Amino acid sequence: MFEKLEKQTLSGRVYAQIEALITGGEWEIGSRIPREADLMEQLGVSRNTLREAIRGLVQVGLLETRQGDGTFVTASSELSAILHKRISRSSILEALEVQHALDREAAALACERRTDDDLTQMERYAAACRQAMSGSEDHEAFKDADWNLHRTVVAASRNRLLADLYESLFEKLQVSILANRSISGTRYEIGHPTLIAAIRDRDAERAIRSVDDYIAHFKAPHERPDDNWTDV
Amino acid sequence: MFEKLEKQTLSGRVYAQIEALITGGEWEIGSRIPREADLMEQLGVSRNTLREAIRGLVQVGLLETRQGDGTFVTASSELSAILHKRISRSSILEALEVQHALDREAAALACERRTDDDLTQMERYAAACRQAMSGSEDHEAFKDADWNLHRTVVAASRNRLLADLYESLFEKLQVSILANRSISGTRYEIGHPTLIAAIRDRDAERAIRSVDDYIAHFKAPHERPDDNWTDV
DNA sequence: AAAGAACCAATCATCCTACCTTTAAAATGA
DNA sequence: TCATTTTAAAGGTAGGATGATTGGTTCTTT
């Protein structure tokens, strides 16, 4: 019947404003934000109020303060910050299993909902993967293209929650998975054409199978459950 | 080589201490925490420091302050708080698809890693489901038992990350999924024996299929993508 | 006695001033 | 040129004062 007219606290509104600047990309990751005095003036609030808002953003993981230096942006969304905290306390195997779960569902849904644009984009990234591994073996480029391909598939699932979780969970992880072992990219690249073909033909069964194969390659070296790492 | 000797900020340490009380269960959900003045004394810090810590916990979603009344515990972990925030902005269909993904993986892993204890517990909850729906149709009891069964399967996957995500995501959601439609429990209950049998026989294929069937029942009424709800 | 109004105490919200600690960078000197 | 010292800037902590909101109590009116 009635809308819940919310009477938010002032520091809460400041928090929201700053958060919007970060999630909106106006304050880029790694950049230094204005000093307290300036923000106080620009926002028209007292130092305490501002600091409470900042402290909230620090605890959530969007900001990091360095006494004597300044305050810096460290992440672009609450979700990604918190999940990053959590996943850094997990084993690589655990993370891979979760990724597997989401990849499978995304692939299946993408079969139903993909557009032709999705498809061409996937093919572009797959080509980039191939090119990165042919000859010079540019692992960095392969990693980027591979990650983009995954993201495209997930985006094609048309499930924002799934996509947000996926990106937040594995964004920073992708580095350590691919970087920490000298992969011979050709092996992993094999899965791409199969997956894309399955999605093109809207064949969910086949798409899932190809994801299974793909993940199995990564999982193999991690079959011990106590394979923790501290900082991705 | 060296541990990163952390020189944490005072308000950060206060935050950690209070968070530990909450996640450790000493301060239960819904309870009122001591007033600022008392906490100041007990912790030996100033108002500002304490308030910054509290504000952090509020923004993360572990606490809620009500001016003129007090401060209350609203969640038991950062993850669950943030994910609850996020999922409340999703459609039921999106949530179900993610649940599907995690359920499948959990079922498959449970086939590998389940113990006999896991199995007996699953059977106990399945029995509770049957009993709840026989005769009097106690939907509340069915919902609890069903949820416990799911949690047991997920726990049997021996993947803490997966389990944390699962519980944090769907803990509060389970209510609205099951409550909002007058389910004839017998239909959904069918899946339980099949799933448990598959896990007993360590037959991942069959376990996954039975999860598919199970979720399909719930999904059916939600095939429209704009089925948003605001507050679970 | 019941209903409403006025009051009051408890609690969080905001602002203020003052001073401390840490850091990066500039100034200094060998 | 290099190492040391100094300094200015930034965030960290403290404590006081006042405002705003809420829930409960008390008082009035009918």
Image (cartoon, coloured by chain):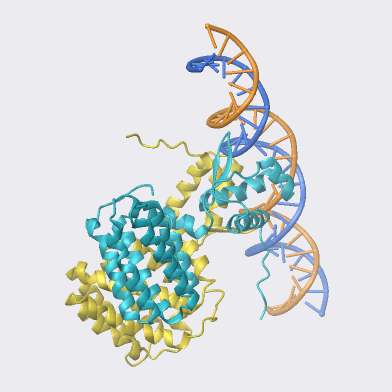
Chain colours: A cyan, B yellow, C orange, D blue
Q: Position of residue A60 (x, y in %)?
A: 52, 53
Residue shown at the point (38%, 68%) measured from the top left: B166
Of residues B160 and C20, the one drawn nearer to the viewer in this rendering: B160
- Quadrant of the rendered image containing residue D30: bottom right
Of residues B166 and A219, the one drawn nearer to the viewer in this rendering: A219
Q: Position of residue A76 (x, y in %)?
A: 54, 55
- Quadrant of the rendered image containing residue A5: bottom right
- Image position of D11 with respect to B94: above or below: above
For the question of whether residue B181 can be seen, the reply is no
User: Considering the image in quadrants, where does the N terminus of chain A appear?
Assistant: bottom right
Q: Position of residue A30 (x, y in %)?
A: 54, 46
- Image position of B25 with respect to A110: above or below: above
For the question of whether residue B208 can be seen, the reply is yes
Of residues B64 and B196, the one drawn nearer to the viewer in this rendering: B196
Residue shown at the point (29%, 74%) measured from the top left: A209
- Quadrant of the rendered image containing residue B129: bottom left
- Image position of A112 with respect to B28: above or below: below
